[in-house]
Amino acid sequence: MGKSGLQAVLTLAGLEQYIEQLPPNNLARQFDFAHLAALNQALEDLFGARGGRGMALRIGRACFSRGLKSFGAMAGMSDPAFLVLPLNTRLKLGLDALTAIFTNFSDQQMLLEDHGEFYQLITEISPMAWGRTTDKPVCHALVGIIQESLRWASDGYEYHVQEIACRAAGDDACIFRVNKKPIGQS
């Protein structure tokens, strides 16, 4: 996107105050969910629905790989002892760790449910859907974060992650379905 692309997104989102000075990189809850929703909307407005979705997925993946992967329980997933665990165990532990990070360090409470062939991650408060009204799911950055966390926990496998319900589309919660089998495995 580059510097000028970032400036355009921030301006379109009404967040010009962050053009010269980005928000602090800390765990204080200082960046309002309304700002994240505005950024999400600005990506769609600037790049179109498909382009905005693609950018948000990449942003989510980058958020995980540049920061969240070294956070708390996620940091231990590169340990050789973790990598010898069965793939299904690593997948579950990775989702448990991601859920714990969001629940303990943000206002985004997450719940993990096991549905046999797939998992569901459920959040009633999604920063991407905050205050938005649409006809389709919009939490693409969260999908990217989940995808990248699973790739990290599985040592390189890709998993199908789909937002199947979204508060912005009128649902009670944002729900993400995660297939237990990696893409390409039967």
Image (tube, rainbow, N blue to C red):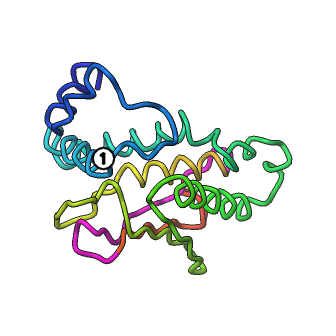
User: As rendered, which of 179 and 138 lies closer to the eye?
Assistant: 138
What residue lies at 55% left-to-right and 73% top-to-bottom? 118
Asked if the stretch drawn in magenta spans residue 171, the answer is: yes
What residue lies at 36% left-to-right and 43% top-to-bottom? 31
The percent coordinates of residue 21 (x first, y second) are: 32, 22
User: As rendered, which of 49 and 30 lies closer to the eye?
Assistant: 30
The percent coordinates of residue 9 (x first, y second) are: 20, 33
What residue lies at 42% left-to-right and 54% top-to-bottom? 143
- Please tell me how many numbered marks the rendered image carries: 1
> Does 137 appear above or below 118?
above
User: As rendered, which of 134 and 155 lies closer to the eye?
Assistant: 134
Disc 1 marks a residue whose amino acid type is Leu
Q: Secondary structure at mark 1?
A: helix
Looking at the rendering, the stretch of residues picked out in magenta corresponds to 154-172
The percent coordinates of residue 41 (x first, y second) are: 20, 48
Q: Is residue 57 left or right of residue 5?
A: right
Q: Is residue 69 left or right of residue 79?
A: left
User: As rendered, which of 35 and 116 lies closer to the eye?
Assistant: 35
Q: Which residue is under mark 1?
A: 36
Q: Mark 1, residues whose alpha carbon is within 10 Å: few (<14), some, or many (≥20)?
A: some
Q: Quadrant of the C terminus?
A: bottom right
